[in-house]
Image (cartoon, grey):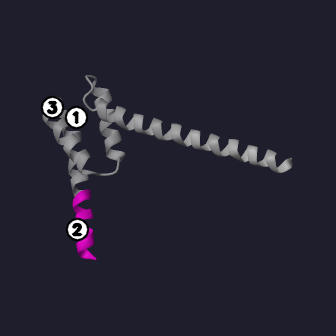
């Protein structure tokens, strides 16, 4: 009888942890897509926040392409300069990663 109770408690705990983890993954994916969408938001503050988010994100070719599109679209010089600085930093990071295996 006691082993059934332990199994039931363990099962409920595992299911709860799995449900919370799944919900966390869904929320993170939603935040990522929302921040990428906000890059082309009509409000400059949201665009600036989206640039800040992209600066913290791991450097990728997709981010480089997104920032190039943004720079062609953006009209405000301040945001365009911020995007250009971010783009340069990400491109340098990607170039360093590409050269790292050759140096070893």
Please indicate whether residue 89 sits to the left or right of residue 3 in the image: left
Characterize the local packing of mark 2: few (<14), some (14-19) or many (20 or more) Cα atoms within 10 angstroms. few
Residue 86 visible, this angle: no
The secondary element bearing badge 2 is classed as helix
Cα–Cα span, label 2 and label 1: 30 Å
**Residue 91 image point, x, y percent:** 21, 54
Q: Which residue is mark 1?
A: 79
Farthest-out residue, right: 1
Q: Look at the image and tell me in which quarter the C terminus lies.
A: bottom left
- Give percent across and percent down for residue 78: 21, 34
| Disc marking residue 73 | 3
Choose top left, top right, bottom left or bottom right for residue 47: top left
- Count of labels shown? 3
Helix, strand or loop under label 1: helix
Image location (x, y in percent) of residue 101: 27, 71
Mark 3 is surrounded, within 10 Å at the Cα level, by few (under 14), some (14 to 19) or many (20 or more) other residues, namely few
Q: Position of residue 93 (x, y in %)?
A: 26, 57
Give the mark nearest the N terminus, 1 or 3: 3
Left or right: 41, with 9 as reference point: left
The range drawn in magenta is 93-104
Picture layout, residue 5 above or below residue 95? above
Q: Relative to 49, is 83 on the left or the right?
A: left
Q: Main secondary structure of the magenta part?
A: helix
Residue at far bottom of view: 104
CA distance for labels 1 and 3: 11 Å
* Image disc number at residue 99: 2
The residue lying at 27 percent from left, 63 percent from top is 97
In the picture, the disc for residue 103 is: none
Q: Residue at x 15, y 31 (%)?
A: 73
Which of pointers 1 and 3 indicates the residue nearer the eye? 3
- In reply to whether residue 26 is colored magenta, the answer given is no
Would you say residue 41 is visible in this rendering?
yes
């Amino acid at each position: 009888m006691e082993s059934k109770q332990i199994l039931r408690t363990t099962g409920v705990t595992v299911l709860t942890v799995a449900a919370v983890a799944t919900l966390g993954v869904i929320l993170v994916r939603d935040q990522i897509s929302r921040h990428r969408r906000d890059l082309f938001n009509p409000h400059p503050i949201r665009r600036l926040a989206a640039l800040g988010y992209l600066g913290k994100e791991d450097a990728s070719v997709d981010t480089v392409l997104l920032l190039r599109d943004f720079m062609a679209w953006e009209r405000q010089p301040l945001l365009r300069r911020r995007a250009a600085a971010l783009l340069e930093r990400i491109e340098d990071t990607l170039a360093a990663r590409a050269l790292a295996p050759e140096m070893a």
